[in-house]
Image: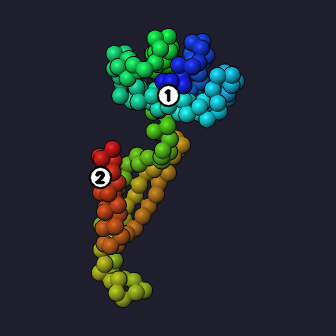
Amino acid sequence: MAAVLNRLPGSDCVKFCHRAVDELCGSKSSCRSDTADTLSLSESLNVLDSLKAFYTLAVVNNYSDEEVLAGMTDLDHSHTKALLNVLRSRKAEIHAALLEKTNCISSTSLQDFDWQLKLALSSDNISSLQTPLVSLNLNVKRNGHVTPVAIEMNREELNTLISSLEAANKVENYY
C-alpha cells in the first residue's frame, strides 16, 4: 500500500483518505476521479480497502499517534501526516460508524422474560400425559416496539434451546 500511496500528490492523498473514511462510514462515493491520472482502478480499490482496514484497526484498538506512526514507516512524511490528520479529525465519526455496524447485526433484542413450569394432565395423545412443559414468555424489542412472544416447550425442546444458547454464549465470549 505504501508504495502506491506514495505516488499520489499530497493533496490527493488527503482527499483519498477522506474518501476511504466516507466509505467506511457508509457513504458510497467514487474515488476514481481523484486518482485516475496516478493509479489504476485495481490499485485505487486495493489502497482504498487497505486504508479502510487501517482506519478500522486504529480506531478499534484505540492506537496512539506513536503506535500509528510506528506502522507507517514506509510512507513519505507528508503522506504519514495526511493519514494521521484524517484519523485524528474523523476518529469519532469512524467509531460511531463501527458501533452502528455492530449494532445493526441484530435489530431485535430481548427486553424481559418470564417462565412457568406446567404439567400436562390431559392430551389427545396418550404418550404426552404427565409431561412437564415450560411456558416461556419473552418481551422482544424490534425497531423500538416491544412485542410479546409466547413459547411452550417440552423437555427435549428446552434442552435444545439451552444448548443453542450456551453455544451462542461461547461464540460471543470467544470474540
Screen quadrant of the C terminus: top left
15 or 123: which is nearer to us?
15
SS label for mark 1:
loop
The residue that appears at 47% across and 14% down in the rendered structure is 76
State the image coordinates of residue 161 (x, y, percent, origin top left): 35, 63
Amino acid carrying label 1: it is Met
Q: Position of residue 114 (x, y in %)?
A: 34, 55
Instruction: Give x and y (percent) for residue 79.
Output: 50, 15
- Looking at the image, residue 67 sits to the left or right of residue 149; the answer is left
Q: Position of residue 74 (x, y in %)?
A: 43, 20
Q: Is 77 placed above or below 107 here? A: above
Q: CA distance from mark 1 to mark 2?
A: 36 Å
Mark 1, residues whose alpha carbon is within 10 Å: few (<14), some, or many (≥20)? some
Foreground disc of the pair 1, 2: 1
Q: Earlier in the sequence, mark 1 or mark 2?
A: 1
**Any part of residue 57 in sight:** yes
- Amino acid type of the residue tagged 2 in the rendering: Lys
Q: Which residue is mark 2?
A: 170
Q: Are marks 1 and 2 in contact (CB under 8 Å)?
A: no
Q: Which residue is mark 1?
A: 1
* Local crowd size for mark 2, using a 10 Å CA cut-off: few (<14), some (14–19), many (≥20): few
Please tell me whether residue 138 is drawn above or below residue 85 in the rendered image. below
Q: Identify which residue is drawn at 60% across, 30% down.
A: 44
Residue 146 in view here: no
Locate residue 136 relative to residue 16 in the image: left or right.
Answer: left
| Towards the viewer: 36 or 21 | 36
Q: Residue at x 39, y 19 (%)?
A: 73
Give the answer, above or below, for where 166 lies relative to 112: below
As rendered, which of 68 and 24 lies closer to the eye? 68
Name the secondary structure under disc 2.
helix
Which of the 4 quarters of the picture holds residue 65?
A: top left
